Amino acid sequence: MVPLAARAGQVSLGSGIRRASPYRFLRRHGWSYLFLIPLFALVLPFVVYPLIASVEITLYDWDGIGHPTRYVGLDNFARVIHDPLFWNAFAHTFEYAGVLVPIQLTLALALALVLNNPRLRGAAVYRAIYFAPVVTSAALVGIVVSLLLTSVGQSLNHALLQLGLVREPVDWLGSPTLALPTIIAVGIWHTFGYNLVYFLAGLQSIPRELFEAAAVDGANAWQRFRYITVPMLREVGAVILFLAILGSLQVFDLVLVMTGGGPYYASEVVSTYIYRFAFTPAAVQAEANVGYASAAAFLMGLLVMGLTALQFLAAGVLRRQRAEAAG
Amino acid sequence: MAVSLVGRRVPDRPLRRLPMLLVHLFLIGLGFLYLYPFLWVLASSFKSPGEFFEAGPSLIPAALRWDNYRDAWNIGHFSTYFLNTVIVAVSVTSLVILISSMAGFVLARTAVPGRTVILGGMVALMFLPGGYTIIPTFELVQKLGLLNTLWAVILVQAAGALVFNALLFLGYFLTIGREIEEAARVDGASFPRIYAQIMLPLARPMVATVALFQFMTNWNSFWIPLVFTLGNPALRTLAVGMYAFVGENSTGWTAICAGAVMSILPIMLVFFLLQRHFIEAVAGAIKG
Amino acid sequence: MFRTTRRHVLRAALVGVVGTAIAACTRAGSFSPVPSAAPGSASSTGGKSAAPVTITHWDWWVTQGPTIDQEIRLFQEKYPRVTVRKTTQVTDQYPSLLQLAVKGGTAPDVFLIPGTPDLIEQIGQGWLRSLDQWATAEWRATFPPQSFAEGSNIFQGKLYTAPFDGPSPWLQLYLNDRLFRQAGLVDARGNVQAPRTWAEVSAAARAITRAAKGDAFGWGFGDKQKFVLPWQMMMCQTSGTPDAQTSFDLRTGTYTWASNPVFLDWITFFMGMKRDGLIVPDVMSIDDETARVHFASGRFAMLIGGVWVQSGWTKTNPNFTEYTVVGLPHEGPVPTSYFYRTPGGVGFGIASQTKLPDEAWLWFSWLNSKEAAIRWVQAGQGVRVFPEANKLEYARTKPYREYMQVALEGTRLAPAPNLRHPTMDQVKPQQTLPDIQGILEGIYTGQISDWKGALLDLQNRQNAAFAAAIKDAQSRGIAADPAWWRVPDWNLTRDYVQI
C-alpha cells in the first residue's frame, strides 16, 4: 500500500451544518478547477482564439497577406457546398478512414496483445524496436515512402509481368483506381506504431492477477480476451478509436507527397482540397484564398461533428429500444 | 516422452518451443519491416545524391560518404540547433504531460460542475480546424512580447497538444479502478497528493507513451519553431535547419537523411536507456 | 515511486527556470553565436559609421546558394566592415514568412522579391523601401534599355527593384546523346539531330524506343507534383499561343483553351506518343527530380526542363555530360510564337524597415552589378539582364552554351497594358477546379475521354471567373475596362512596340 501521512479530521459528514455556498463550493471543487486552469490558460489563447479568428476569416476572400478586407459573407460556404470536387474529396476522406481504422486498430491490438504476453521472452527488446522513433520529419517520410514505393512498385511490376498477371506495368500512384488504396496501405503502416503503443499502455493498466485468476478458473485465451481485456479496455479503447478516426480524417502529408490528390482528384482528400486554396504553391498561377479554404475546413469539421452526433443519437436510441425490449 | 511432475504427458522441449519460435520469427520480421524505412534513411545518409534516386530499396550504400554528415552539421547549424531542439522538446513534453494529466484526472474522477460542457468543448475542438493562417497567433504572441523567443515556440506547441493528450489521459484514468483512490481519500489524502502519488504513478504507461510521442513530434516540428524565431535564427530547431536543403527544384536528400540520423540517434539512445526503467516501474506499479 | 513523481514536477520546474533564463538571454541578443544587428551599432541616418555591421539577406535559392555564398565572400573582402548573413527560406512559404518578419519588425535588409503577392501590394504593405536616393540616372544607365518601367518596378515615380534574370525561355528540351546515337539520329559530323517539330519528336521517340528494345524510351517526365504535365504542354508556347500556361491571349482578352486549336493538337500528339508506348510507363508515380536522374541514367531520351537541371546533374550524375540543349519544338516548321518578356523586371529589394540602408544598398548594387552578373553566368546559373554578361564564351560546358543560345534567341517583347493601367493587376479571377493541371492528368490517365469538351469547359469557367472579377473590381470602385486586356494588333513573332 502507498504510505501516506495521516491528516487530522478531514472526514466530511454528509448532511450537516449548511455553510455559505461559495465557501463550500470552493472547498469541494476548488482543486478541480485549479487543476484545470493550466489547460485553459494555454488552450484558450493559443487554440480557441485562432479558431474563432479563422471562423471570422471564412466570411472574407483573403489572399493571406495583410488583413482580410473583401467581405463576402456566407458566399464561400455556398461555393464549397456547390463544388462537386469538395464532395469528391469528402467521399475519399471517409473511404480512407473507413478502411484504415478498422484494419489498423485490429492489427495494432493484436500485436499489443502479443507483446504484452509475460511469457514472451525478450519482450523488452521488441517493445524497444516498436517504440523506436521511426517518426522522422514529414518531408523525409514522404520522399522515403515515395521512393521505396517506386522501386518496390517496379520490382512488383516485374514480378507481375513475369507471372503474366498484367499486360503492362502498373502505375501504382498514377492509376485512378489504385492510387487511394496504395495510400491507405501506406497510411496503415505509417501510424500503426502509435496505436500499437497506445494499446500497449492500455493493456498494461489491466492487473495481471485478473488474468491469472481466470486462467486458474479454466478460461482459455479467447475467453480471457473477451471477458477481461475487452471490458477493461473499453474506455481507453474508445478514446483511441475516436482519436484514430479523427486523425485519419485529417490525413494530409501522406496524400500530398505521394499523389498530390491526383490523378485528376482520384485520391483527393479534404485536407489537400483545402491546401489548394489556402496556399499558392509556387507552380500554380492562382491566388490563394484563405477565406475559402477556412470555410471548407470549417464545413468539414461541422459535417463530421454532425455525423458523429447522429451516430451517438442513433446508438442511444437503439440501446434504449433494446433495454425496453429486454425489460 | 518426458513426464511432468503432475503426471501429464508433455511434448518434448524442442517441439514445445516451436510456436514460440514462430512468434519470435514473426515479430523479428515485422520489426524489420517496421524499421526498414529508418534503416533506409540510415543507409541513404551515406549515399551520393545520384545513388539516392537510383539504388532503390537497397540498404547498402556504395561507399561510406561522410560528406552528407559534414554538410548537415555545417549548413544545418547542427550544434546550435540541437541544443534549442532539446530545450523545446523537453519543455513542451513536460508541460504537456503535467497539464493534460492534471486535466484528464479531474475530468475522469471528479464531478466538476460544467464537466459536460468542458468535455464537449474539448471534443468539439478536436473536430474543428485550427485555421490556415498563423497571423492571429503571431499577433497575440507579439502583444505578449514573446516574439522571437523560445517561450513562444514552447507555449504554442504545448497548447496545441493539450486537448488531444488530455483526452488520452481521461480515457486511461477512467479505466483505472477506484479502490486505491478511495482508500487514500478515506485515509485523508488531499487532492494534489492523490494526483501526484497515486494517479500519476498508476498512469505511468500512458505517461511514457505521451512523453515518447510528444517528444518525437516536437523534435521534428518545423513551422511553429520557424515562424516564432524568424528574427533570431540562432534559436532555430533542427527540423528548421534541415529545410535549408529543400530547394525550389531540387533537394539535398542525402544531407537531410544525415541530419535525420544525427538528430534521431541521441534520442534513441536516451529512450533505450530510459525504456527499461519505465518497464520495471510499470511492473512494480501494477503489482502494488 | 515518491521520488519519481517528484521528479516530474522538479523536471518541469527546472525546465521552466532554464527556459526563462535562456529566453531572457536570447531576447537581449547576447546568446546568439552569430553576430546580430544589435541596436546601436550602426547609424541609420546618413553617414557611414565605422563600426562593423551585419546585414541580413533572404532568398529561397538552394541550387544557386553556392554562387551567392561566393558573392558574399567577395563582397566581404571588398568591404570588410559589412557582414552579410544569408538565410535561405522555404520557397512555398516565402511570402508568408516575409510578411511575418515585417510584422515582427525583423524584416531582412535585402531580400529576393517573391512573385506573390503583387509588387504593388508588397509596397502597400510597407515591405519595400524606395531606391531613388541611390539609383541615380547614371546607375540606371548601366542597365539595358527598358529595364525600368512604371508599373513594373517603378511605382508612382519611385524605383523599388531592378531586374535580375535575363529574358529567356525558362524551359528547354534536353536530349540524351547516347540514346540518339544508338538510334542513328546523328548527322554526318556526329552531332545529334535535334527534333524541331512535334512530328520529328514522335519520329525520334519511335526510333529510340525501337533501338533500345525495351531498355529505354523516347520521352519521359515525372508528374507526381502535378505541375510537370503543363510543362510538357509548354511545347505550345512556340506554336501560336502567347501564354501556354494559362491560355490567356492578349489579342482577344480571353482564355483560349478550346478556341486556340494548338492545345488540342498538342494533346492529340502527346497522347499519340503515349498510346504507341514511346513514353516511360510510370510517369505519374515519380517526381521531377527522380525523372531527371532517370534521364541522366539513360532511361529515356528527351526531357523538358530548365537551366537548373544542369547544376542538378553535377550533383546526382557528375559523369553525365553527353546531352544537348535545344529550344522547345514547335508544331509547324517554324516557331509561330515565342517566350515573352515585358519592360522592367523584378529582382531583389531593400526592406523599408532596414536600419542599415546604405550598407543594404552596397550589397544590393553589388548583386546587381555587371561583374557579379558575369560570374553568375559563368557559374552556370542562367542568363542575366546585362547583355555583356551573356556572352557565349562565358559558358563552361557545351550544353550550357547551347542553353545560352536558346535563351538569347527565344524571347520577344510582349505588350504590357498593365503598365499603362495599373488597376488591371487588381482584377483577380478566382481559382476554379478542375484546373489545367487536373485536366491534363485526367486526359493522360484516361479518366477524361472528351478532350475538347474538357478544354471548352475550362475555358468557359475561366472566362466567367474573369468577367466576374472585373465586375467585382468595378463594384469596389476600381476602374477596370475589359478593353484594356485586348491588344489585337500584336504580332506574336515580333517584338511589340509599346506606344
Image (cartoon, coloured by chain):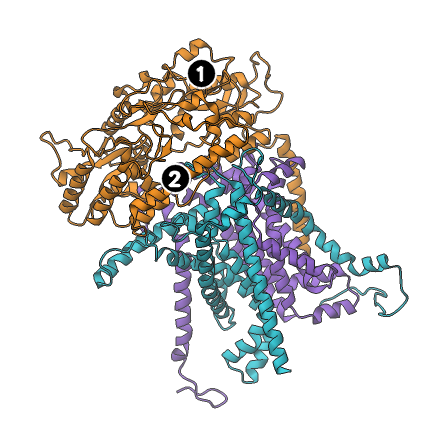
| Chain A colour as displayed | cyan
The residue pinned by badge 1 equals C78
Helix, strand or loop at mark 1: helix
A265 versus B119 height, above or below: above
* Quadrant assignment, res C327: top left
Q: Residue C102 at what x, y percent from top left?
A: 56, 29
Q: Residue C116 at what x, y percent from top left?
A: 47, 32
Front residue of C466/C410: it is C466
A209 versus C418 height, above or below: below
Residue C375 at least partly seen: yes
Q: Chain of mark 2?
A: B
Q: Residue A57 at what x, y percent from top left?
A: 58, 42
Q: Quadrant of the N terminus of chain B?
A: bottom left
Chain that is purple in the image: B
How packed mark 1 is, by other alpha carbons closer than 10 Å (few <14, some 14-19, many 20 or more), is few
Front residue of B33/C102: it is C102
Helix, strand or loop at mark 2: loop
Q: Residue C414 at what x, y percent from top left?
A: 34, 23
The residue pinned by badge 2 equals B251
How packed mark 2 is, by other alpha carbons closer than 10 Å (few <14, some 14-19, many 20 or more), is some
Mark 1 or 2, closer to the camera: 2
Cβ–Cβ below 8 Å for labels 1 and 2? no
B14 versus A107 height, above or below: below
Specify whether C169 is left or right of B78.
Answer: left
Which amino acid does the dot numbered 2 rest on? Thr
